[in-house]
Image (cartoon, rainbow, N blue to C red):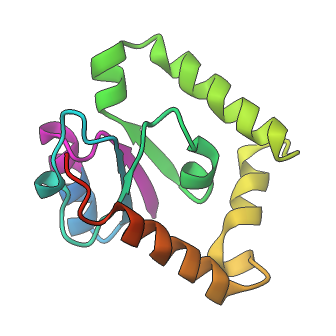
């Protein structure tokens, strides 16, 4: 299962991400590192350094599940609406009617050029490498 863990570089999120990696899930940690640390991200998880409300569609599109840790702890339950609105705007901008459609369009297995998809993810990882918290 592909799981996105927001706030996964924090203490709680890091433990959650570690448990998911340990059970064999494909884990993507999304964290802006404002309070978290790269050291909390378990080996085997991909780290995407960004604010959770920005770039939601591309990061969440292929996820089977999303665990929102720090965003809800920091901003409270009402922040779910901010995240939902950001996702709806992204879907509308890309002329997609649902998350299922986004997942289909952005998945590795359905892309027209799987090698380009892999290169783009590799470049994103390199760009986040070495950025301080």
The reply to whether the magenta stretch includes residue 89 is no
Give me the residue at 83% from left, 36% from top: 92
Instruction: Give the residues in magenta.
Output: 1-16
Left or right of 80 on screen, residue 61? right
**Is 111 above or below relative to 60?**
below
Q: How many marks?
A: 0
**Is 34 above or below relative to 79?**
below
Left or right of 56 on screen, residue 5? left
Residue 68, quarter of the rendered image? top left
Residue 45, quarter of the rendered image? bottom left
x and y percentages locating residue 130 in the rendered image: 23, 63
The N terminus, quarter of image: bottom left
Give me the residue at 24% from left, 34% from top: 34
Give me the residue at 26% from left, 72% from top: 44
The C terminus, quarter of image: top left
x and y percentages locating residue 55 in the rendered image: 57, 44
x and y percentages locating residue 118 in the rendered image: 56, 81
Left or right of 101 on screen, residue 82? left
x and y percentages locating residue 78 in the rendered image: 47, 10
Give me the residue at 51% from left, 72% from top: 121
The reply to whether the magenta stretch includes residue 2 is yes
């Amino acid at each position: 299962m592909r799981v996105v863990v927001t706030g996964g570089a924090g203490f709680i999120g890091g433990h959650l991400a570690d448990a998911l990696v340990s059970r064999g899930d494909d884990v993507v940690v999304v964290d802006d590192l404002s309070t978290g640390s790269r050291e909390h991200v378990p080996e085997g998880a991909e780290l995407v350094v960004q604010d959770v409300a920005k770039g939601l569609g591309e990061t969440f599109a292929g996820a089977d599940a999303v665990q929102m840790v720090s965003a809800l702890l920091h901003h409270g339950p009402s922040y779910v609406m901010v995240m939902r609105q950001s996702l709806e705007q992204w879907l509308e901008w890309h002329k997609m009617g649902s998350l299922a459609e986004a997942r289909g369009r952005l998945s590795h297995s359905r892309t027209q050029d799987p090698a380009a998809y892999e290169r783009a993810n590799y470049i994103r990882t390199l760009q986040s490498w070495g950025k301080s918290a």
